[in-house]
Amino acid sequence: MKMTKSMANILLLITSVFWGSGFVVTKIALDANVSAGLINFARGLLFVVCVLLFFYKKIVKMSFKDFKVGLIAGLLNFGGFITQTIGVIYTTPSNNAFISATYVVIVPFIAWTIYGKKFQAKSLVSIGICLIGMVIMTGIMSEEISINVGDICTLICAFFYAGSIVYLGYSASTADFSVVAFMLAAVQSVGGFIFYLIAEKGQFSDIHWSDALVPLLYMGIICSFVGQTLQVIAQKHTSATSAGLIMMLESVFGSIFSITFGFEPFTLKLVVGGTIILLSILMMEVEIKPMLVKNKGTV
C-alpha cells in the first residue's frame, strides 16, 4: 500500500509523542547521574543494535551513496542534539525550548534557498501562529530578555535541526531508510562517546544504574530506534515544512508527560499555547479550495 501524505503525517505525530515522552525519561536518567554525552552514546548504541537486528542484510550491502547521505543526515542530527545539550546548561529551559523551536521558521527558507522549493503564504501564517503558541507555552515574554552563550548555542541547534529536517525530506528521500537510520544511530553513538570523554568528567561508578537502566533502554529503543526510523520513513512522503510543524508538538507532548509524572504543574499557558500550536498545524494541513457559487438571482 502506497503511503499518503496523511499517513506520513500520522507517523510524524507518533514520533512527536515518543520524543515528547523522552523529556521525562531523560530527566530521570540525568537525576540518576547519567551525563548528557553518555545518554547520547547509550541511545545511539541501542539504536545501532536495533537497526542491525531488523535490517542487517540491507546495512551490510549499503551503497556508498546511501552511506554518504546517511552520514550527512547523522552529522546534522547530532549537531542539533549536542548544541541543544550545551545550550540548556547556560540558558533557561524556556529560552532553550523557544529558540530551539525556531527551526520551524528556518525550514522553509533552507528548502527554498538550497532546493528551490517554493512555499505558500499559508505556510508563513501557520509558522507565525505556531511561534505565538510557543511564546505563550514557554512564558518566555515574562522573563528578562538577554542573550548569552547558551542562547547562541541553542540558535545554532535550531539551524542544525532545520537542516536535518530539510535534508531528510529532500536529499535523503531516495536513500534506503534503514541505512539512513543506521547512520543516524552510529553518528549519535560515536559523537556522544567522544563528547563524554572530552567535555564531561562523569564516572560510571557515580551512576545509579537501577534508576538509569529503564530510561536508557526506553530512549534507545522507543525514542531513537522507533521514533527516528518512523521519521526517516515518513519524511519521504510529506513536505519539510509540514514535518517541522508536526514535530513541534514534541514540546507540547513533553509538557503533558511532565505534568502527568509530576515534574511540573498544570498551567493555563500550556493549554492555550498547545492549542494554538495545534491549530497552526491544522491550518497548514487543511486544503482550502475556492468555492464556486452560482448566482441564482438572490441577494
Image (cartoon, rainbow, N blue to C red):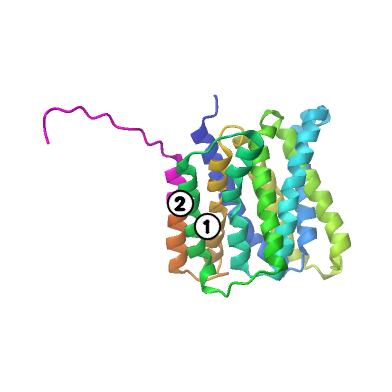
Range of the magenta residues? Answer: 279-299
Quarter of the picture holding the C terminus: top left
Measuring from the top left, give residue 93's x and y in whole percent: 62, 67
User: x and y percent of residue 4 in the render?
Assistant: 51, 30
Image quarter of residue 156:
bottom right
Which residue corresponds to mark 1?
252
| 88 up-or-down from 45: above or below | below
Verify CB contact (< 8 Å) between mark 2 and mark 1: yes
Is any part of residue 45 visible from this angle? Answer: no
Is most of the magenta stretch helix, strand or loop?
loop
- State the residue in front, 298 or 204: 298
The answer to whether any part of residue 213 appears in the image is yes
Give the number of the disc on residue 260: none
Please give the count of numbered marks on the rendered protein. Answer: 2
Q: Quadrant of the N terminus?
A: top right
Q: Residue furthest top?
A: 1
x then y, percent, for residue 11 = 56, 40
- Earlier-in-chain disc, 2 versus 1: 1
Query: Which residue is more in the foreground, 38 or 120?
Result: 120
Type of residue at label 2? Leu
Residue at image mark 2 = 278
Left or right placement of residue 286 versus residue 151 in this view: left
Above or below 103: residue 112: above
Residue 144: percent from left, percent from top: 57, 75
> From what the image shows, is residue 176 above or below residue 48?
above
Q: Which residue is pictured at 47% across the width and 58% down the height?
A: 274
Separation of marks 2 and 1 at Cα, in angstroms: 9 Å
Quadrant position of residue 192: bottom right
Does the magenta run of residues contain 296?
A: yes
Query: Viewed as shown, does residue 2 lie left or right of 114?
Result: left
- Dividing the picture into quarters, in which one does residue 68 lie? top right
